[in-house]
Image (cartoon, helix red, strand yellow):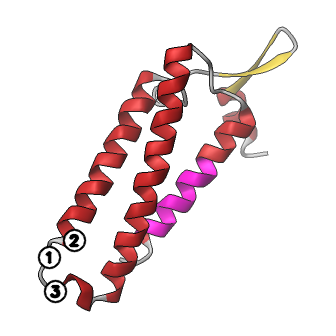
Amino acid sequence: MIYGGLIKRVFFEFGGQIKMRVFPGSPGTLTSLFLRIAQCVFAAGSIASMATASNFFNFTAFCYLIASMGLQVVWSFALALLDGIALVKKKVLHNPDLVSLFVVGDWVSLFRTSEPS
């Protein structure tokens, strides 16, 4: 029951339907688009800085990390594209299943990129 208060703060009932509150950075907002583009740019910068190092390929952890950052670029770009489409079409991406997919994908991305260190 510890999560009951959190669920009540994120979701609310409106006209018999469960709606999600709009938070800064929630899917389909301009803030979310900016954050996803920033994630993509910083992951690409990380790849560029590691790939230009002189002894980069001598360390297995860095080779794994560059592959992980490549997946991060793809994930962030795909979600930025989805946010952009939602903004252009003025669609709301607050479907609980879709938000759960974003959360799980971001968690996987977090643990994948922080594992080598």
Q: CA distance from mark 2 to mark 1?
A: 5 Å
Residue pictured at 73% horizontal, 34% vertical: 96
- Residue kind at label 2, given as amino acid type: Met
First of labels 3, 2 by sequence position: 2
Left or right of residue 98: residue 23: left
Residue 115 coordinates in the image, percent (x, y): 44, 74
Quadrant in the rendering for residue 1: top right
- Residue kind at label 3, given as amino acid type: Asn
Placement of the C terminus among the 4 image quadrants: bottom left
Residue 114 in view (yes/no)? yes
Which residue was labeled with disc 2?
50
- Which one is in front, 70 or 24? 70
Badges 2 and 1: C-beta atoms under 8 Å apart? Answer: yes
Residue 55 coordinates in the image, percent (x, y): 16, 86
Q: Main secondary structure of the magenta part?
A: helix
Seen from this angle, which residue lies furthest right? 16
Which residue was labeled with disc 1?
53
- Which label sits on residue 55? 3
Examine the structure image and report whether residue 97 is included in the region drawn in magenta: no
Q: Is residue 79 above or below residue 10?
A: below
Left or right of residue 100: residue 71: left
Q: Residues within 10 Å of mark 2 (few under 14, many from 20)?
A: some
- Residue kind at label 1, given as amino acid type: Ala
Residue pictured at 88% horizontal, 13% vertical: 16
Residue 23 in view (yes/no)? no
Element at badge 3?
Answer: loop
Element at badge 2?
Answer: helix
Q: Residues within 10 Å of mark 1 (few under 14, many from 20)?
A: few
Element at badge 1?
Answer: loop
Badges 3 and 1: C-beta atoms under 8 Å apart? Answer: yes
Residue segment shown in magenta: 103-113
Left or right of residue 60: residue 2: right
